[in-house]
Amino acid sequence: MSATTETAGARLVAAAAGFAAASRDAAADWDREGRVPDGVRRDLAATGLLAADLPPAYGGAGLTPAEVGEAAAHLGGVCSALRGLLTVQSMVAAALARWGTRGQRAHWLPALAEGTLTAGFAATEEGAGSALGEVETTVDETAGGAALTVTGRKKWITFGQDADVLLVLGRTGGKPAAVLVETDRPGVTREPVRGQLGMRAAGIAHLTLDAVRVPADHRIAPPGAGLSHVAATALDHGRFTVAWGCVGMAEACVADAAAHAATRVQGGVPLGGHQAVGALLARIAVDAAAARELAARAARFRAGGQGRGVTETIVAKYAAADAAARAGRDAVQILGAAGCASDSRVGRHYRDAKIMEIIEGAQQVSELHIAAHVMRRFGAGA
């Protein structure tokens, strides 16, 4: 890697840290209001952090996986919705970069990298959460194959309230298909979701696609590859940034809990001097450190090329989500009433971490994949 690229990577990681620090106080307001303001989203796009791992030819900065991870950790440590914006934008960009045609990449990727378009990944449905192979949205060819008609209902779409373009997972002739749908086309309606447990500022929406017509060149990859190739690439990228965002959450909870335990006096000694509190701090600090090591390991594997590190990323996401959930729970316990306040960062992280344990498949789904990998690795010689 050139020195210029390394400088760009370091600059963008520093920009993520600065943006996170500047957003710390406002994040609680966004959570209460249920939205990241449009201006904040534009400001984040202006930093160049969205889809920053794209090649410079498409408007990205060519960030390494480790640099993308550090940026996600900085944002996640302050506001999961900010990290969610980075995640969903880079998910769609990654899928297009790998499986789009040359023309599709040239048309869509610069706008995603610049943030002039906000992307949404519209995969989940009422009966298709972890089991995305069960999606019922249809993508039918019309006008002699010159156009596609998309019909279905998508649920729990991150930044679905704001997205300008959706990467939609559906079916063509019974085969999984992926297609881009602009949200200003006739037939697209949005139902904002408010008051959910976590990720409250992430503009989540349910989306109805009622015979939405798009050009045939909006389809990404042939029918049959929509799930195994296009969606799989997007989900893999999403898991990676979620893992690092959870690392950021866990580390923030440790820092806030330790600061409180060091200054709050109970029984004539700092709270952290009590054995039970010290034990809680020790456990969540070790969990956070272990999650960071696993996320860094996934980054090293992913740096080896496309398709590398899929299992390592699943392991990292599993461990980091668990670490964030434990850190949030125990940090709230240590802070007591302060941890339950409406502006408490650890309180928000506690709620958001539970969503991270569920998102894109519950922890048990990851356990099945990890267990299968372990059996393949060690069972061959049995």
Image (cartoon, rainbow, N blue to C red):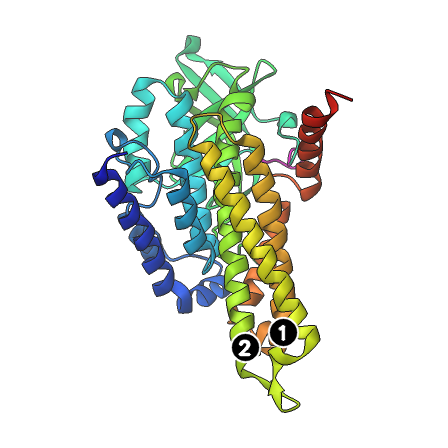
Is residue 340 found left or right of 5 in the rendered image? right
Q: Is 215 rendered above or below residue 352? A: above
Q: Is 95 rendered above or below residue 276? A: above
Residue 210 versus residue 296: which sits nearer the camera? 296
Residue at 48 percent of width and 21 percent of height: 149
Where does label 2 land, which residue? 260
**How far separated are the C-alphas under marks 1 and 2?**
8 Å
Where does label 1 land, which residue? 334
| Contact flag, marks 1 and 2 (Cβ < 8 Å) | yes
Question: Does residue 63 appear in this view?
Answer: yes
Magenta range? 124-129
Toward the right, the furthest residue is 382
- Crowding around mark 1 (Cα neighbors within 10 Å: few <14, some 14 to 19, many 20+) is many
Magenta residues, dominant SS class: loop
Quick one: SS at disc 2?
A: helix
- Crowding around mark 2 (Cα neighbors within 10 Å: few <14, some 14 to 19, many 20+) is many
Residue 103 versus residue 140: which sits nearer the camera? 103
- Give the amino acid at mark 1: Ile
Residue 197 image point, x, y percent: 61, 57
Quick one: SS at disc 1?
A: helix
The first of marks 1 and 2 along the sequence is 2
Question: Does residue 191 appear in this view?
Answer: no
- Give the amino acid at mark 2: His
Residue 211 image point, x, y percent: 50, 26
Quadrant housing residue 147: top left
Q: How many marks?
A: 2
Residue at 67 percent of width and 79 percent of height: 274
